[in-house]
Amino acid sequence: MKSAVTVSLVPEAVGGPFVFWDGLEDAFAQASSFGFDGIEIFPPEPSALDVKAVGALVQRHDLPVAAVGTGAGWVKHRLHLCHPEVEIRRMAREFIVAVVRQAGALGAPAILGSMQGRVEPGVEREQALEWLTEGLSDAANAAVAAGVVFLYEPLNRYETNLFNRQLDAAQFLAERSLAGEVRILADLFHMNIEEEDLSATLVGLGASLGHLHFADSNRRALGYGHTSALPIVESLKKINYSGYLSAEVFPFPDSKSAAQRTIESFRALTA
Ligand code: LER
Ligand code: MN
């Protein structure tokens, strides 16, 4: 298992669960000095991820990109895959595919979180699931072409009504023949709200688990809340999970302390 830490390049996301906020140079330098294995980037749009410039930082710090979020498509541009307007759905799919290509060029998977959207009033659930499938298929095709996977993240009930639970989402991917190229991103914060048993759920995911957001019950760094992390890590070992535990957490009480607490928890739990 590998550790990762998040950086947001999106001023509109201020107050959100990202550890670093002061640009890529700063985030790479800090992540590397804390000893993280990777960095997860939240860009404002695909073009903000300059593959040459980010690639140079990866080389300089010997720190790979763990994943790239697409959430700014929603937070900044108000696009989502299940929007009733066809043009907005088309722009949402384009935004996601463009992030998949940029991330893929850096050897990293892109994430579908907030941009999945929700079943809006007046839209049938089955119709929204069709639109979600189209978006996932486009992203999966672009990911396969780039030699990476795509990550689908179930969110808690206050953020989506599509899929809130991990195993429901995994079953949906299997039913739509998307399992394999699309893996599940399990966020411990969302799971803490929605799942009965976090450890059993992770065991149930098995090989469909592609990435993990490593957050405590209150979305602070692991160690600042009441999640029992040891059985979770035991479950990850049981399924031979070798991906990232990425700190998508609030910079509480500040970025450095959140990073420090995360890496200490990661080391203690995975030792
Ligand atoms: C994205 O990874 C996520 O977890 C959502 O809650 C948006 O912040
Ligand atoms: Mn998350």
Image (cartoon, grey):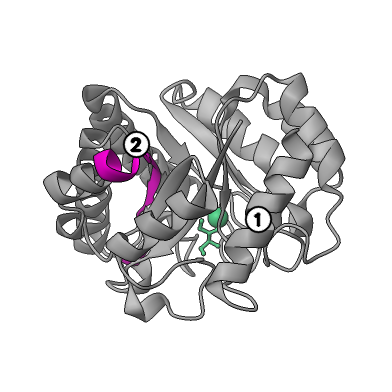
Query: In terms of depth relative to the viewer, which is nearer, 21 or 239?
Result: 21
Q: Residues within 10 Å of mark 2 (few under 14, many from 20)?
A: many
In the image, 89: left or right of 199?
left
Q: Which mark is residue 108?
A: 2
For this view, does 146 lie left or right of residue 116? left
Residue 112 x/y as whole percent:
42, 48
Does residue 131 appear to the left or right of 242 in the view shown?
left
Residue 157 picture location, percent across and down: 66, 63
Residue ID for mark 1: 262
User: Of circles 2 and 1, which is in front?
Assistant: 1
Is residue 197 shown left or right of residue 81?
right
Residue 34 position, x and y percent, is 53, 53
Q: Position of residue 174 (x, y in %)?
A: 54, 24
- Residue 80 placement: quadrant: bottom left
Mark number displayed over residue 111: none
166 or 33, nearer to the observer: 33
Residue 210 versus residue 252 in the image, above or below: above
Instruction: Tell me the magenta residue range.
Output: 58-72
Asked if 57 appears above or below 189 in the picture, the reply is above
Q: Nearer the viewer, residue 209 or 78?
A: 209
Q: Earlier in the sequence, mark 2 or mark 1?
A: 2
Q: Is residue 16 magenta?
A: no
